[in-house]
Amino acid sequence: MSMLEQADAASSRPMLKWYITAGVVVLLIILGLAGLETSAILATSLRSGLGVQGAVFALAAIGVNLNYGYTGLLNFGPVGFMAAGAYGMGIVVTNGGPFLLGVFVGFASAAFLALLLGLPTLRLRGDFLAITTIAAGEVLRVALRSENFFSMGIVLVLLLGGVGALTYFMPRIASNATKWLMGLAASAAMIAVMIVIWKARILAGETGGTLGVPRPNEPSIVDTFYNWNPFPSSNYSLTDIAGIGDLLAKVPWFGDVLDETAFNARQLWVIVITWILVLIASLTVWRITTSPWGRVLKAIREDEDAARAVGKNAFSYKLQSFVIGGVIIAAAGMMRAMDQAFFNPESFKTQTTFFIWTVLILGGAATTRGPIAGAIVFWFFLLFIEETLDQMVERDWIPDAVLDPNQVSSVRFIVLGITLASLMIWRPQGMFGKKEEALLDAA
Amino acid sequence: MQPDSGKGVGAFTADPTPGSSKPDPILIMSGISRHFGGLKAVDVDHLEIQRGTITALIGPNGAGKTTLFNLVSAFDEPTTGRWQLDGKELRGKQSYQIARAGMVRTFQLTKSLAKMTCIENMMLGAPDQKGESFVAALFGGWGSEEAQVQAKAEELLERFNLIHMRDEYAATLSGGQRKLLEMARSLMTDPEIILLDEPMAGVNPALVQSLLGHIEALRDDGMTVIFIEHDMDVIMGISDWIAVLAEGSVIAEGTPEQVGQNPAVIEAYLGTGFDEEDLV
């Protein structure tokens, strides 16, 4: 451990945590003295940061972190993987399939999407991958809007892409006739599958078009999940969850905060499961990235030609990273679907992608804690700003001519944008990133 | 007459003519060409590299030396041609497969992995690591091998005088140290033949001597070294054999003495109209 790193570990990282906490406390005191309802502000922010939103975005950011932070792949289409997970699961469950099969299909869809996108594009340079993935996410969303897209449109496009990739890359993998034949056989098989799907209309209309999943009169997608909920119906405040009893609840202001932060049993169940998934994903990513496998990923991030020059199959590692990252992101998509019990194509707009990236950059790429801390802080402040502005507008501190109540949710992004820009200038490594690494980048 | 190259370990006898056959060739290139549009960057009819020697690849700027390296290490695809390492056909193989087959290379613009420490840079190089498969990475079982890899990496760092930088990021090394690190990392793969692209370029003159020492030591360990270099003193000093490229083709081959007296080489470097005496 170098001097710089020691200094960093010893001082700035723990200090940052206290800076943020102190900043929030001071802000709350000022706002409280000014007459705002600070318990509501804090409660709303906490609900979001520690709740489903925080957990879902932490999970998705962990997946993107594996791609970008550790492998250097600019995956700008995480929302596409969330969609693949949610739709894969939704289609199975609304057709009466078992929930766990649905989950499996959700993961498999994301892995398939990763292969489909990765095979042709991972040979491209970083920025091309970014363009391809962001486009793929949008294509998927727009395609999902059309009622019958699966009957032909996207299947055609995706499968032809797959066939193209296979026939193009099979001979490159090893130039001999056997591989050519395998490529042709695989192409023929895929075309056959395509024709079967077309003729049988197996998937026609299954995505629900703009109506989403589940459509009216279709079985719920979340029943099984909530049937497993062990928490009795009640309201759970943060102290209940932390197991420290309701001592704080008797203190006037804290009591209000705790009351307003309370989750019902259903929300609590989603939150607990999602945070458990975050923990599992974090540990998995930590374990694999600290192994020799992870060392190859980092080498590819730094310079993939150098990795090739010492005999590492860079393409294979990039594909592995892409698939594993995609599967983790798909889990986030499925958990969000569990929370909302419904989704449609509009649930998967590019905004989600940008939020995930913001979370990752805020927390610090290529760190284990980064995505988690980033997600909590991001959602905490987004809601903090919104609730504060809401109350200000409500009390007419800000005249409607300047800002009316409908505009608040847009203005919060302006404030957040300024915050992020400042962060990039003064702390480019994010909350947990190593400052020296960020400096090396600039050099 | 076939004079001995006189270098002891790397000595062998062969015809000093372009494309001549060697007594024990490790690398044989035949008919390798690379066209960029109308430009023929490389057009090597035949070239053999003797096992266990230091062979220098020289030639004026734009002669196609680096392109030839790129082609044989599959970082670029030749328009035509084939080449064999120890009798194994390499045409159509990918760059990582060529490295695994025993031929590694370094780059003119050093590729140190900036945000990895020196020891991580080194440990990456070890071949066939169990922990490099995803399943093993997840479930473990690579710990003991990792310790061996680390010991080997430290030994090489020691040998290349980089052990004091063990835990520093590669980006903090000087240009010369990065060249050393890249060379050491290549050696982690236990290569049979190593291609060094301008190993001395940009290296502090104080380090050049030690670098030369390392290169000679590799040859003395039985490795084959091919290197591209511009500094004539360096080349004459350590090469067992020299191949001269000009406009993509091999125009001369031979021991340093033979090449130094070859009029074709002098012409390629300096153009026509010079007397041999002008060169001294």
Image (cartoon, coloured by chain):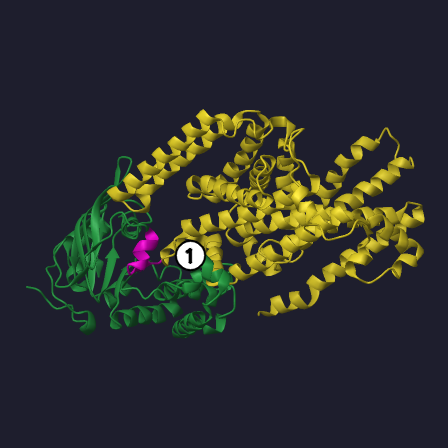
Chain colours: A yellow, B green
Indicate whether residue B51 is drawn in magenta: no
A274 lies above or below B164: above
Q: Is residue A228 above or below residue B14?
A: above
Q: Quadrant of the C terminus of chain A?
A: bottom right
Q: Is residue B238 left or right of residue B110?
A: left
Q: Name the residue under label 1.
A: B111
- At x 49% / y 40%, what residue is drawn? A113
Seen at 83% across and 32% down, the residue is A405
| Span colored in magenta | B95-106
* Amino acid residing under circle 1: Lys
Q: Does the magenta stretch include residue B105?
A: yes
Q: Mark 1 lies on which chain?
A: B
- Bin the neighbour count of mark 1 within 10 Å (Cα to Cα): few under 14, some 14-19, many 20 and up: many
Q: Which of B89 and B109 is in front in this view?
A: B89
How many numbered marks, from 0 up? Answer: 1
Quadrant in the picture for residue B55 = bottom left
At 41% from the left edge and 49% from the top edge, which residue is drawn?
A: A315
User: Can residue A88 be spotted in the picture?
Assistant: yes
- Examine the image and state in which quarter residue A193 appears: top left
